[in-house]
Image (cartoon, rainbow, N blue to C red):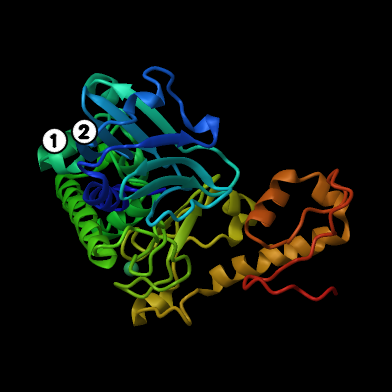
Amino acid sequence: MPELPDLEIYVEALAARIGGQVLRKASVRNPFVLRSVDPPLAAIEGRTVVGVRRQAKRIAIDFPDSLHLVMHLMIAGRLRWLEHGRAPPARITLATFAFDNGTLAMTEAGTKRRASLHVVRGDEALAALGAGGVEVGELDAKAFAARLRAENHTLKRALTDPRILSGIGNAYSDEILHRAKLSPLAQTAKLDDAAMLRLYAATRDVLREWTERLRTQTGAAFPEKVTAFRAEMAVHGKFRQPCPVCGTPVQRIVYAENECNYCPRCQTNGVVLADRALSRLLHKSFPREICAIGRAKGCTGAHAICRRQRVARLRLPLIARRHSRASGAFARRPRMVRLLLSRRVIASPPRRMHLAHRASPRPLDCDGHRIAPS
Ligand SMILES: [Zn+2]
């Protein structure tokens, strides 16, 4: 999902192109994307853009008479700027906005239609679209602490909750917590003042640095490569890769659609946090700590996974193989099948799970290679 730094760059690129321009034609290609009825989309046609701004995770384009076109890109939504009569990409385009100097296209990859458009009148209606979170840039350290401590949540949840703070999602919250050297599962109510101050500074610094970095990378062009996974990130999307600070392999906690990445040495005193689905399956084999050898010597990615962790990695394919011989056992454990599928330990669900035409499970090892049948 585009977060604060990406959205800031979008806003700057849009302001440079459509600021002061007249919107000639607004067309919606997928009726689901427009979530408001009154005022109609036609109300903004023929009007001049008087401003572009970020409103939490939305982008608002302002027109005279307090009319606003509000775009929420959600996870897979992106913006494209098309010049010289270039056509928008056929299947993924949700809406287009034609100006004299080019066309703005809103696209969404995949099949889930989550991105949205609203046309609203008045600043109150615009504010009502938001979840009530506050911009970190508008908070001082004291107000930030008060806001986070108002309810007790894990730090990961508090940073990404749009009702508490605006514009921070899964990617930058991982980076902020790594910078602050705090566990994603630490509780806001139990955080001492020094740690809270560190979190405040890390939040501001990480968002500012990333906005500047993306601004430099984009230059005068329109931002094309908007992604949550970037090479310069310390831990987000870096599972098993060495932490840039201490070299320990980055760990993860997997949720339904997301995962949280952290360094077990920098952030959790060497403790590998329970990944509920995985630890329930592996019971005592689930590693609780990073390896003792690595801690003394300073791990590199090559040797760092301790024996217990290796046992855990090896056990999953073994479980998969054992069950694949008697797929009846698999059929009784759909939750485990889902887990093995999500970890790519098996490539497809077993036959007896009411999926008659699927291939039988083919166990994969941790590197994704198929295990030869024994
Ligand atoms: Zn580290």
Query: Looking at the picture, how far across and down is residue 112, in whole percent?
Result: 57, 40
Q: Nearer the viewer, residue 214 or 308?
A: 214
Please give the name of the residue rendered at 86% of the width and 43% of the height, measured from the top-left corner.
354
Left or right of 272: which side holds 350?
Answer: right
Query: Looking at the picture, how far across and down is residue 79, in whole percent?
Result: 40, 49
Quarter of the image for residue 298 reads: bottom left
Number of residues whose C-alpha sits closer than 10 Å to that of mark 2, classed few (under 14), some (14–19) or many (20 or more) = some
Residue 183 visible in the shown view: no
Provide the secondary structure element on which disc 1 rests: helix
Residue 312 visible in the shown view: yes
Quarter of the image for residue 139 reads: top left
Please give the name of the residue rendered at 47% of the width and 65% of the height, measured from the top-left corner.
239
Left or right of 173: which side holds 253?
Answer: right
The total of numbered circles placed on residues is: 2
Which residue in the protein does label 2 denote? Answer: 147
**What type is the residue that disc 1 sits on?**
Ala
Write down which quadrant ligand 1 falls in: bottom left
Query: Looking at the picture, how far across and down is residue 214, in whole percent?
Result: 27, 61
Which residue in the protein does label 1 denote? Answer: 143
Q: Nearer the viewer, residue 171 or 195?
A: 171
**What type is the residue that disc 2 sits on?**
Arg
Provide the secondary structure element on which disc 2 rests: helix
User: Is there a contact, CB below 8 Å, between mark 2 and mark 1?
Assistant: yes
Q: Ligand 1 near label 1 (Cβ, under 8 Å)?
A: no
